[in-house]
Amino acid sequence: MHQSAILAPALQSQWLMMHVSMMVLGYAALLCGSLLSVALLVITFRKAIKIIGILSGAVWANEAWGSYWNWDPKETWAFITWTVFAIYFHTRTNTNLEGVNSALVASMGFLIIWICYFGVNLSGTGLHSYGSFTLN
C-alpha cells in the first residue's frame, strides 16, 4: 500500500471528519425527504387516477346506457364510499374531530369498501354484475 503524500493544510484539520460526517447525514436526510416526496406524489397520482377512472366511467356509462348516472347498486355504494372518505378527510383536518372520531370514520369506510367491492359485485344485481356468479 502506498503511503499518502502530505495532505494540503485544509485537509489536516480535525474538523474535516466532523464536516464530512455532518454533510453525509445532511445528504441522507435530504434523500429521505426526497423519497417521501416522491411517495406523496405517487399517492396523489393514484388519487388522480381514481378520479379520472370515475369520470371516464361516467362518460362510458353515458355512451353504453344513455346516462352518466343510473343509481345502480355499484354506483350508489361507490358514492357512499367516497362520501365516507370525504367525511374522514374532513375529520382529519378539523382539530376538534381528530383522533377517535377520524379512526371510527376510517373503520366504517373500510367496511363500506368491502360492501362496495364484494357485496355488490357478487350480488348479481344491477348494471355492474359482471363479476357475479349464480348459486344453484
Image (cartoon, helix red, strand yellow):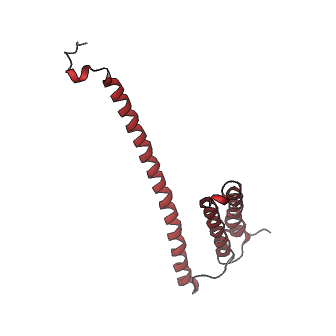
Quarter of the view holding residue 67: bottom right
Percent across and percent down for residue 65 are 58, 84
* Residue furthest to the right: 136
Compare residues 12 and 58 and report the one nearer the observer.
Answer: 12
* Residue furthest to the front: 96
Percent across and percent down for residue 20 are 33, 29
Percent across and percent down for residue 92 are 61, 59
The residue sitting at 68% across, 54% down in the picture is 99
Compare residues 97 and 87 and report the one nearer the observer.
Answer: 97
Image quadrant in which the N terminus is located: top left
- Position of residue 128 relative to residue 17, above or below, is below
- Position of residue 107 relative to residue 6, above or below, is below
- Position of residue 105 relative to residue 123, above or below, is above
- Position of residue 10 relative to residue 72, above or below, is above
The residue sitting at 75% across, 70% down in the picture is 134
Compare residues 69 and 132 and report the one nearer the observer.
Answer: 69
The residue sitting at 72% across, 61% down in the picture is 108
Quarter of the view holding residue 91: bottom right
Percent across and percent down for residue 45 are 47, 61
